[in-house]
Image (cartoon, rainbow, N blue to C red):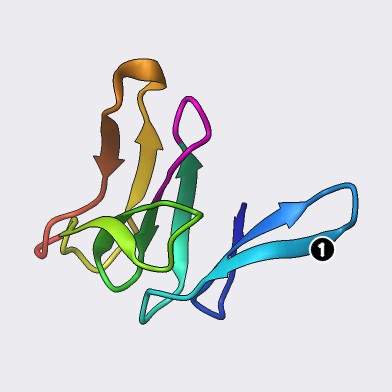
Amino acid sequence: ATSGFDCSIKIWDIEKGMSICSQEIATKEYQCVSWNYDGSTLAAFSKDKFLRVLDPRSKAPAQEIIGHEGPKGGRCLWLGSKGKILTTGFSKSA
């Protein structure tokens, strides 16, 4: 999966070299995209300050919460098979 300045996340078929799925949910570009342990969902952090859990088979986010509200970018990472997401970011005063 890749993310770009067009505010979308694309999932690729590497054998064909083409995008097979695209999700355009965020209002600003994504800064971090991470697959979960079994490859069924993605966690994505965007510049609009939202952390989204995305099911690639659905157009709507499975979950969406406000993440770190600081001016700098946030990051997210699935914690192995535990089903938990680690995020890092800054506060408003950073």
| Front position in the image: 32 or 84 | 84
Does the magenta segment cover residue 3?
no
| Residue at x 25% of width, y 63% of height | 50
Asked whether, in this view, residue 2 is left or right of residue 44, the answer is right
The kind of secondary structure the magenta stretch mainly shows is loop
Q: Is residue 42 left or right of residue 61?
A: right
Q: Amino acid at mark 1?
A: Met
- Asked whether 23 or 92 is in front, the reply is 23
Residue 37 in magenta?
yes
Residue at image position (90%, 55%) is 16
Q: Residue at x 20, y 53 (%)?
A: 90
Q: Is residue 38 above or below residue 56?
A: above
Q: What residue is disc 1 on?
A: 18
Q: Which residues are magenta?
A: 36-43
Q: Quadrant of residue 88?
A: top left
Residue 39 lies, with reference to residue 33, above or below; the image says above
Q: Secondary structure at mark 1?
A: strand
Q: Is residue 6 above or below residue 38?
A: below
38 sits to left or right of 11: left
Instruction: Find residue 51 and report its image quarter.
Output: bottom left
The quarter in which the C terminus is drawn is bottom left
Residue in the image at 47% along x and 42% along y: 34
Horizontal placement of 27 versus 35: left or right?
left
Q: How many marks?
A: 1
Q: Residue furthest right?
A: 16
Q: Considering depth in this image, is 81 or 20 the residue closer to the camera?
A: 20
Q: Position of residue 43 (x, y in %)?
A: 38, 47
Q: Quadrant of residue 18?
A: bottom right
Residue 68 pos. (x, y %): 18, 56
Instruction: List x then y, in percent, for residue 32.
Output: 46, 53
Residue with the most extreme top position: 81
